[in-house]
Image (spheres, helix red, strand yellow):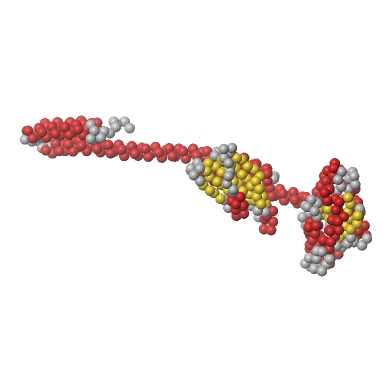
Amino acid sequence: MGTAPPTSIIGIQGPAIGLSAAAGVAMCLVAGGPPWWAAHAFGLGIASIAGLRRSPWAVAALVPLLALPTGSWTVLAACAALGLAVPACWELWQRIEGADERLLLREVGIAHHECGVLQRHLRRYPTLMDTCQSLSSARDPDALADVLCRAVERIVPAWLSIQVYLGTGGRQSIRARLQDPDHEEIEDLSQDIAYVAGELRPLIRRGPINVLACLPLRSERRSDPEAEDAHHRGVLLVRFRSQGAEDVLNLEILHALGRLGGLGLAAVDLVAEAQSLALRDELTGLFGRHEFFRRLQETLAGARREDDPVGVIMCDMDHLKRVNDTFGHATGDEALRLVSKAIIETLPSAAIACRYGGEEFGVLIPPEAAAQTEAIAGALLQAIRSHKCLEAAPDLCLTASLGWAISDGNELPTCLMARADAACYRAKDGGRNRVEAG
């Protein structure tokens, strides 16, 4: 502001105007009234003290007063009132104008800060695009968790800890994490993680120092509800330092990252399902012939190095064609599923079963259980006999013919399978519903 700073009326101008008024009143009392020259001189003095220093238009305001009748007390009173009022009004105006200016500067500062925050926020979105591309190439949960962790590290500079939990069937385990060396997580968040993963709802906790965001990651595929537990779910847990208004933007972009993580989980599920379809039989859920033979080769190679035996069992259902012809192929498929269920329930945990082809099944017994191969084959035979749950034929007793063999030294996989298969055919030729050794 170009004008001189306002001076309080009780500072400099107050005493000057007071002295001038006292002198003027004394002159008027001595002369018996205010002569015209005294009134005019007093008016011009007040104008020079108040008007010229504060506002030039105050001098112009005195001109009509000087035209009043000479010798009038009116000129003296009007000039004194104007001289006293002008400084007070001008000081009030300056204060109001100064307050408006400070308020404007404060608003400009706030707007400038918010503009900077928004610019930094907008610069994060290309990172989201890069993350989306990286997630699309992730083929397993661990790779996806690592991508999410690195994305949060770039997007939220104020992070203190980043954790990614993934799992199926309500069981979540940590797959990736980053931790600020100066920050230590001492709070048990297992219940929060279970809630978010189970309910698929975000959980936000704001504190005076930091903010905790617990966000769900969900594969949004529409699937059979019975298979829902087979699909991945996850939780993205981020703790970051509170930054006031910027917290809302951090949470907004973390929500977007959580949705991208859900899409990535859907891709992981699709890849797992495609691999499963390629490796497993669609009807029974057992491994297919190609995968079974590959695993047999790997197991035999490891067993040779340790000079350990490996067992193989071949199982052929009895009279499946008769079941299909009598009750229909739907009942035949049900019979195949029952036999595969009996095999899975009977085998030791490390054993591998496959649908070898048609009504044939193959079982690989690892070295640690190879000595029990004959006993396992007998248990399989009894388990298949005990399943009488066919809906169309509740009294039908399913049976099978089994042959088993144990590897001998450097025996090739094809030779071991051929011995077990030959034993299975001997069981069929010997009257079925029995077990033969290869």
- For the point 28% across and 33% down, the residue is 6
Toward the front, the furthest residue is 186
Report the front residue among 119 and 70.
119
- How many marks the image carries: the answer is 0
Image quadrant where residue 327 sits: bottom right
Residue 241: x and y, percent? Answer: 53, 41
- For the point 53% across and 45% down, the residue is 211
- Would residue 70 appear left or right of 138 to someone viewing this image? left
Residue 308: x and y, percent? Answer: 86, 45
- For the point 61% across and 52% down, the residue is 194
The answer to whether residue 107 shows anywhere in this view is: yes
Report the front residue among 350 and 5.
350
- Would residue 438 appear left or right of 41 to someone viewing this image? right
Quadrant where the image shows the N terminus: top left
- Would residue 40 appear left or right of 5 to someone viewing this image? left
Residue 199: x and y, percent? Answer: 60, 55
Report the front residue among 54 and 196.
196
Toward the bottom, the furthest residue is 395
Residue 22: x and y, percent? Answer: 14, 34
- For the point 13% across and 32% down, the residue is 23
The answer to whether residue 43 shows anywhere in this view is: no
The correct choice, above or below, for 366 with respect to 156 in the image is: below
